[in-house]
Structures are given as structure tokens and as C-alpha cells.
Amino acid sequence: MLVFFVISMAPMLIVGIFAIRHSYSNSINNVVVYNNSTLRLLTEELNTYFMRCMELGNLVEGEAIIQRHLRNPLPLNRKTRFTEELEISSQLYFIHNYTLKDIFGIYVLGVNGGQYRSNSLSFQKNSFRDDTFFRNTIIGKTHIWMHTESQSIAAKVIDENFISVSRPVIDRLTGSVTGIVIVETETNILQRMIDSAAIFEKSTILLADGEQILCMAGNKDPIRYGDEITGPKGNRKMYLSEIDQKKYMTDFVATVSGFQIMSLVPLQNMRAQSLSIVSVLLVFIFVVLVLSLSLDFFISSFLTKPIKELSLKMSQVENGNLNIHLEPRYRNEIGSLVSSFNSMIKRTRGLMERIILEQKKINELNYKVLQEQIKPHFLYNTLDSAIWLSRDNKNDKVIELVTSLIHMMRLSLNDGKDIITIEDEIEQIRNYLFILKIRYDEKLSYGIAVSRKASNFIIPKLTLQPFVENAVYHGIKNKEGGGIVSIDCALEEEKVHFVIRDTGVGIDENELRVLNDRNRSEIFSNNPAKRQGIGIKNVSERLYLHFKEESRVWIESVLDQGTSVHIIIPQRRVNPDEII
């Protein structure tokens, strides 16, 4: 074992030594390339933004209305001056909001004393003609970038940092300088750009104006820019610097604004990449060692594997998984044990399927019993109503009544099939309510609203009827003055949602809580006062039988105000094998 270990490890150690020496220079080059790419992309993004700000200033400077008003003295009339300020400020507002929205403001300051802005803020003072930035812009006749800390360059704003670019307004007719245009933006805009840069681990990237830091991202340990870090004023240079006794690979890039982008990458982190090679090599050696030691246990594991596999399958059976089958790969005692286990699972699975089938038949028998319970008293009341209509010589009503009854019986029979379309179920309810309307006359009103798209979806027969019957007999009938029953059917995502509402006497809170609990069998007892629970339980169980957890039934009610029954089933199309 020792000889095998030495022979295996020696070549890898030799290769590892050369790999470590080569990886150091490679890791430094990779970091430099990565850092250069990040700075290039960030510089392009910042330069694009700076150029857009300068182009916006050029656009404002060339506006005819700006040229005209700065060329002439300010009007002495206050109303005329106000109109002039409103006109120019409106134009600046339009340019601001339809060209570069993320700037803070545009200001036009005239030599004639005129002051105009694109935002609603007040100016800091009445004149800026004596300020350094105003004079420098007038004299320089070019773009000048500035940074103001904790305040705007012109507007009354505090506790915010800004950068701004100014340019002179040159009269197109005389060639003289008549004012300046300032485009101002918050440094937060630049901060977001720098934050989005994909910088190297524990490195720092910042934007500075040569004297102080404007924005910074990454490792934000305090640094003294301009003291321990000095950079070129040209376009770009990379060199090593030392800050707080830590060495950094430092890189400068100048932008079109004159602001500098600088990155500082710790040399310690750059060297860490080469150390990762050592870690990988050590892990590899460890894996080989483990594999070598594992050979000693191969034979014993080969013998115990079948028993462990059988034990695992038994645990799954204990957790209720009966879809288990083990392949008997061994012709010995273990193989016989596996075959006996498979036979036991097969018998158990067959027994469970038989129990489920028997329960389904029991549910179907209960449903047929419920149908028989509904028919006698309803037929009696309907025929009794027909007799009274006939005595009153209302033969047309008798015909309508009997026709509705015939339609109900036809749909109830349905060749013994339990599934019908929603269209037929609603037609059944419509006939049922029509018959009850004739019996109760003005005491009962009803309405039915069904989405046409729901017509061809399927539903168990007589799903709605028990709830409509409860609404009439236990809600409207017992309320003085009668009430209204409404049935709504709508599509919601992949479901069909029925709502059966009545304005009857309602249900008290305790009884409602019991009715909504399908697991409380006491509400389905033989007590005549609780017989309405039979229909609710039967509908819930039949819906679960057909749709499983995709169906849901619940009741909402307020005492003396009314009751709403909600039924939700999945959207399933008509199957010719299930309905007529």
C-alpha cells in the first residue's frame, strides 16, 4: 500500500511544483486583462454620459430663443420680464425632460443678468456674474467641468453632491459671449455606473477630479487620494503603489470630462489565484488517497450492498411508497428474500387498489340513495302545484311546469352516467328554479349568469342542486318577504368558479364553521335539523372523487343577510365516453 501511494503521488507532486511557478505570472496577467476590460467598459459608459451632457449644453446654447433674449437687455417691465423667464424656462423644461431626464437641471445665466432654469428650484442668488466659474467659462470659451459638494452650483439645494459642465453662449450674429449654459447632474448617477462595474475581488474603483474622490465602489477602506496615491495627468498609466503598507496594482484612465477613473487591485488577492492551484492539487492528492484506501473495503461493501438496498426499499414502503420493485440479481438466500419482498408488495398494492375501488362504489351508491331521497318530496310538491294551477285554469303554466319537470327527469337519468356538461347542469338548475318559482311566486326571485366559454366543461351531475335547494328551503323560505337566489359561473385561470348566493336568513358563525369542516361527520347525522349536511358532504366527496385536490367547496354567510356557496373545479373538456 505504501509503495503504491508513493508511486502515485510522485509524478503529481513534480507537475504541481511546475504548475505553481507558472500560475503566478499567469494569474497576474489574467487580473490585468480583466481589470483593463472593466476600466474600458466603465470609461466608455462614463464618456458617453459626459458627451451627452455636453451635447445637451450645445443644444441649449444654439436655441434661437436663448440667443434672442441674451442678446438684448432685460426688460424693465416686471410683467414682460416674467413672461420672458417663463418662456425660456418652459423651453428648458421641455429639453430637459425629452432629451436627458436623469440630469438634475439646466441653467442659463446671461451677461445681461437674466437667469433661467429647467427645474422648479430657486436660484441661490440674483447674479452669478462675479463667481469664478462664470468668469472662467466666459473667458475660456469652452466646456468646463466642475464638482460641488453638498450643494448645487446654482440652485438652492443642500446635502447633495453634484457635477456640472458649463459652456459659453456665443451670439450667432455678433460673435460675442452673452452668457453661459450649465448642465448639472447628481453624482449618484455616476455612482450607480461605478457600482455596476464588474470589479476584481476586494479591489477599489473610483472617480476623482484630481483633488478629491467623487464616487467609489468595491473595497471602501479610507484612502488619501493625492497623498499616498499619485497618478498621471495624461490618458493612462499602470504602476504599483503602496497604501497603509499594502501594495496595489494601480491604473489611471482619464475621461473626456477631465475626471480620472482609478482602480486599485491588492497584490495579495492577485497572488491568491496562484494559491488556488495548490489547493486544487492538494484536494486531488487527498481524493487519490481516499480512493486507494477504499480498495480495502471493496469486498466487504460488495457483500453488504444488497442488504442495504433491501433495507432502504423497506423504509420507503414504511413511508407509504408501494411502487417498489427490486430486481433479484443474486441466486442465493438474498435473492429469495428479494423475491418474497416483491411478492408482498404486489399483494399489498392489489389490496389497496381493491379497497379504493370498493370505496368508490360505496360513494356511487350513496349518491344514488341521495337521488332517491330528493325525488319523492320534490315530485309531490311539483305535482301538487300543477293541480292548483289546473284548478285555476292556468293551463299554459301547467304545460311549462310539466315540461320543466320532464327536462329535469331526463337530465337526472342520463343513462346512469354521473358526468354532464356545465351547460346541462345549468339547464337543470334553471328548470328546478322555474318550478320553485311557480310554487313560491313572489316570495322567490332568481338569476343565472354563466360564462359561455364554460358551457362545454364537465361537472358531476347534480353538483349545484343541493346548494340551490338549501338556499330556497333553509334561506329564502324562512325569511319574511322572501328573497333572491343567484347562480354565477366564471372562468378563473385554469378553474371554473361557481357562486350560489341567497339573501335569506343566513347561518350563525358556529354552525358555519362546522359546515365548512368536511371531516366532522356529526353534521351528516340522521337528525332532521341537520339533513342539509347530507347534500354538502355528498357533493364534496363526489367532487374529490372526480377531481381530487383540484376541487374545493366552502360557504360564506352572515346571519340575517344571506349565504354564498363557492364551488371550484378544474376546467376539463367534454369526453364523449362520459356523457351523452
Image: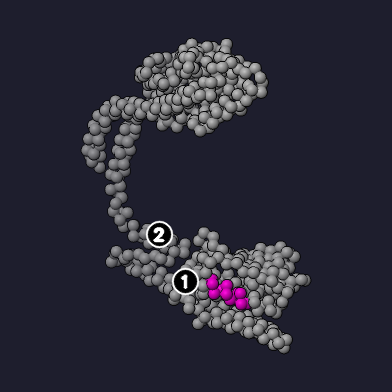
Quadrant of residue 120 in the image?
Answer: top right
Pinpoint residue 516: horizontal percent, then vertical percent: 64, 65
Residue range corresponding to the magenta coloring: 422-432
Above or below, 190 relative to 534:
above
The residue indicated by pointer 1 is: 574
Residue at 22% from the left image edge and 35% from the top image edge: 11
Q: Amino acid at mark 2?
A: Leu
For residue 279, side relative to residue 222 (left or right):
left
Numbered circle sitting on residue 566:
none
Q: Is residue 250 magenta?
A: no
Mark 2 / mark 1, whichever is N-terminal: 2
Res 7 visible: yes
Q: Is residue 428 magenta?
A: yes
Above or below, 480 relative to 178:
below
The residue indicated by pointer 2 is: 312
Q: Main secondary structure of the magenta part?
A: helix
For residue 189, side relative to residue 531 (left or right):
left
Along the line of sight, the residue nearer the viewer: 221 or 299: 221
Residue at 47% from the left image edge and 75% from the top image edge: 578
Res 156 visible: no
Residue at 33% from the left image edge and 38% from the top image edge: 283
Q: How is the image coloured?
A: one colour
